[in-house]
Image: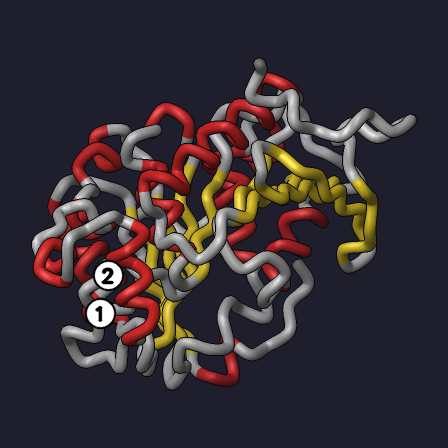
């Protein structure tokens, strides 16, 4: 049996064999895939080569960036694997989804992975063993070390229930095995750097749930030491919420520059933040409405 045999029968004019709905003025198709629910939102004017952004967690939460990606001609896609912290069992479904998108539908072979909060675990965990299948990584206050969140072993509050669930998802025998785990994003950066995968993070410097100092700052320092390309946008005074930027133009240009190809990439490249950039935004700046 093919990995794709569990799909519903095709509907006339519906490439994705799914149920259409409105996603902020764009058409979203929802469909079952390998016992999961998947979604693809189509831009009105798709770019050549069908580049796409793969959101890894929290569908339709803080969607400003996703809507901007669609406006720019990028597809936005998602597969729901539950609250599983990027564990190996969940990553098998990611493999199915990637094959479905690329082999079955001709989507670009190097999407941007969008990891919001704990979605950072899914993005980094899949990317470090699939470096040939990733155009760039976009982390939005991403979890980069489970000891920080949900473990709460540093300055963050953590989450007792999520810590217990994460240990179970990874089939660890107990807390010590999780503490000894060397598969967190901060530990698996070398393959990404060797593959020259660009990374951009947006964080709040007052994040009490996923502290920047224990997550993004560690990942950035290590990635730069490995010779990787990393851009950081810091929102002064921002906690874990709200996510994103009211004007996501820098992120849109960064993703276009590294995933779109052709004229779209050429146009975006001089506008995208260059490697090593740290942009610090005041509350007035990161809350300002944009035109993306």
Residue 279 is labelled as none
In the displayed structure image, the side of residue 244 where residue 88 appears, left or right: left
Circles 2 and 1: CB distance less than 8 Å? yes
> From this viewpoint, which residue is outermost toward the top?
1
Pick the quarter of the image with the C terminus.
bottom right
Residue placed at 53% from the left, 68% from the top?
245
Rendered image quadrant of residue 34 = top right
Looking at the picture, tell me which residue is in the foreground, 63 or 146. 146
Residue placed at 47% from the left, 35% from the top?
93
3D distance between C-alphas at marks 2 and 1:
6 Å
Question: Is label 2 in a helix, a strand or a loop?
Answer: loop
Q: Is residue 161 above or below residue 278?
A: below
Rendered image quadrant of residue 97 = top right
In the displayed structure image, the side of residue 118 where residue 44 appears, left or right: right
Looking at the picture, tell me which residue is in the foreground, 171 or 277. 171
Question: Is label 1 in a helix, a strand or a loop?
Answer: loop
Residue 157 appears anywhere in the view: yes
Q: How many marks?
A: 2
Residue placed at 72% from the left, 43% from the top?
30
Disc on the earlier residue, 2 or 1 = 2
Locate residue 280, reporting x and y percent: 36, 72
Looking at the picture, tell me which residue is in the foreground, 45 or 15. 15
Residue identified by numbered label 2: 146
Residue placed at 54% from the left, 40% from the top?
256
Residue 253 appears anywhere in the view: no
Locate residue 275, reporting x and y percent: 31, 47
Q: Is residue 106 above or below residue 84?
A: above
Rendered image quadrant of residue 168 = bottom left
How crowded is the residue under tag 2: few (<14 C-alpha within 10 Å), some, or many (20+)?
many
Residue 151 is labelled as 1
């Amino acid at each position: 049996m093919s990995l794709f045999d569990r799909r519903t029968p095709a509907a006339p004019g519906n490439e994705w064999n799914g149920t259409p709905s409105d996603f902020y003025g764009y058409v979203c198709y929802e469909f079952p895939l390998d016992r999961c629910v998947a979604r693809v939102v189509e831009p009105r004017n798709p770019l050549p080569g069908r580049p796409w952004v793969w959101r890894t967690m929290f569908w339709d939460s803080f969607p400003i960036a996703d809507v901007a990606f669609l406006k720019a001609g990028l597809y936005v896609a998602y597969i729901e694997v539950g609250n599983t912290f990027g564990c190996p069992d969940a990553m098998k479904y990611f493999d199915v989804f990637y094959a479905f998108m690329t082999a079955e539908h001709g989507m670009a072979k190097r999407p941007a992975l969008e990891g919001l909060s704990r979605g950072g675990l899914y993005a980094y965990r899949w990317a470090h063993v699939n470096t040939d299948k990733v155009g760039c990584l976009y982390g939005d206050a991403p979890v980069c070390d489970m000891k920080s969140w949900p473990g709460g072993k540093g300055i963050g509050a953590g989450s007792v229930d999520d810590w217990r669930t994460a240990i179970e998802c990874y089939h660890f025998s107990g807390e010590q095995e999780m503490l000894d785990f060397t598969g967190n994003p901060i530990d698996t950066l070398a393959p990404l750097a060797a593959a020259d995968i660009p990374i951009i993070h947006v964080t709040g410097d007052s994040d009490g749930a996923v502290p920047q100092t224990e997550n993004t700052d560690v990942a950035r320092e290590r990635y730069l030491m490995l010779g990787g390309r990393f851009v950081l946008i810091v929102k002064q005074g921002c906690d874990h919420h709200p996510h994103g930027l009211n004007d996501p133009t820098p992120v849109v240009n960064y993703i276009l520059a590294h995933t779109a190809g052709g004229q779209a990439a050429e146009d975006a490249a001089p506008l995208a933040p260059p490697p090593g950039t740290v942009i610090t935004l005041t509350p007035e700046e990161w809350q300002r409405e944009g035109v993306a």
